[in-house]
Image: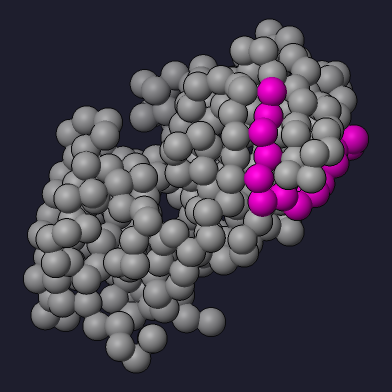
């Protein structure tokens, strides 16, 4: 499959307000993709939902490669417009955190990311579904989702990922843990006060709460927080600051292909963006997308 991968008609879907100096980086990406002889059609997003619509339209327009240029939120939108599809999707990281680029080993420099887009390995991967919405990396319910809901977007544009730390400190002092219950495929039940549904290893950057998860696999690794106290949350925050493994004391790790989570008013985030409240069903969706990954 690798030898046959020679994209000639590329759709570049780019977010011009992702990260700093995005417009210049997008033009550089367009140039790098085109200099190998491919025809590149650029679409710039202007509002939420634009990337998903552009990806959906591209499915039937004869493109042999779609490239998302932006942050993890832009990539999530493109995935939701594209999946299920066999058209390869590549990523050029421009955003605040770019967790997928870290997970996959995609370079943060534009030229390097474009080299992967043009010469990497198209790899079938498993997506996650939260209700009817797809996610690539992870979903969360509880404390971390509340942090996402309360991030000041203006502060995020100025401070980048530090805005999440500011939000986390505020939520830490105001958060009232609410119980949730997890129903698994086999009928068993587990209870806790927060969870991460990991489709990949990394969370919020180079941190890992689900070290046993892998994008090509057909199941999640779930991290269920079983203790409600602030001590466990403080433990996580300190380990983030010290760049240590994140798995908190009292956490339960397990694999699952499907789970239904109940919890009164508990917020949910997917791929770092707000996504409503529990109850919600999470499902692994094997082979729904082909991502261009670096060669091993």
Q: Residue furthest front?
A: 187
Q: How is the image coloured?
A: one colour
In the image, taking residue 50 as reference, residue 241 lies left or right, namely right
- In this rendering, the answer to whether 188 lies above or below 157 is below
Residue at the (75%, 22%) spot, across then down: 180
Residue 178 placement: quadrant: top right
Above or below 205: residue 41: below
Q: Quadrant of the N terminus?
A: bottom left
- The region drawn magenta spans 244-262
In this view of the protein, which residue sits in the foreground, 59 or 42? 59
Image point (45%, 44%), residue name: 134
Q: Is residue 140 left or right of residue 134?
A: right
Q: Is residue 112 visible?
A: no
Q: Residue at x 87, y 25 (%)?
A: 227
Number of marks in the rendered image: 0
Q: Where's residue 218, x and y in %?
A: 61, 61
Q: Position of residue 104 (x, y in %)?
A: 51, 64
Residue 103 within the magenta-colored segment of the rendering: no
Is residue 260 a member of the stretch shown in magenta? yes
In x, y percent, where is residue 131?
51, 34
- Is 227 displayed left or right of 81 in the figure? right
Judged from this view, the residue extending furthest toward the bottom is 3
Q: Is residue 210 left or right of residue 267?
A: right
User: Can I make out residue 3 in this image?
Assistant: yes
The residue at the point 17 percent across, 50 percent down is 57
Residue 146 x/y as whole percent: 59, 20
Residue that sits furthest to the right in the current view: 250
């Amino acid at each position: 499959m690798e030898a046959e991968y020679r994209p000639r008609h590329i759709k570049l879907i780019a977010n011009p307000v992702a990260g700093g100096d995005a417009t210049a980086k997008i033009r550089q990406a367009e140039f790098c993709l085109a200099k190998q002889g491919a025809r590149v059609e650029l679409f710039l997003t202007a509002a939420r939902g634009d990337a998903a619509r552009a990806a959906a339209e591209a499915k039937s327009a004869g493109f042999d490669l779609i490239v998302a240029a932006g942050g993890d939120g832009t990539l999530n939108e493109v995935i939701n417009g594209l999946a299920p599809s066999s058209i390869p999707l590549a990523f050029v990281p421009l955003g605040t955190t770019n967790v997928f680029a870290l997970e996959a080993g995609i370079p943060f420099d534009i030229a390097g990311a474009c080299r992967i887009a043009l010469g990497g390995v198209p790899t079938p991967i498993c997506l996650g579904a939260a209700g009817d919405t797809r996610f690539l990396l992870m979903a969360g319910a509880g404390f971390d989702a509340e942090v996402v809901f309360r991030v000041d977007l203006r502060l995020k544009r100025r401070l980048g990922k530090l805005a999440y730390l500011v939000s986390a400190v505020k939520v830490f002092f105001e958060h009232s843990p609410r119980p949730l219950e997890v129903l698994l495929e086999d009928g068993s039940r587990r209870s806790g006060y927060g969870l991460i549904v990991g489709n990949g290893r990394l969370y919020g950057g180079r941190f890992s709460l689900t070290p046993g998860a892998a994008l090509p696999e057909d199941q999640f690794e779930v991290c269920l927080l079983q203790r409600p106290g602030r001590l466990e949350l403080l433990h996580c925050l300190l380990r983030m600051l010290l760049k240590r493994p994140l798995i908190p004391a009292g956490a339960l790790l397990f694999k699952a292909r499907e789970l239904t989570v109940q919890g009164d008013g508990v917020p949910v985030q997917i791929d770092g963006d707000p996504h409503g409240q529990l109850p919600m069903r999470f499902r692994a969706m094997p082979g729904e997308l082909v991502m261009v990954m670096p060669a091993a």
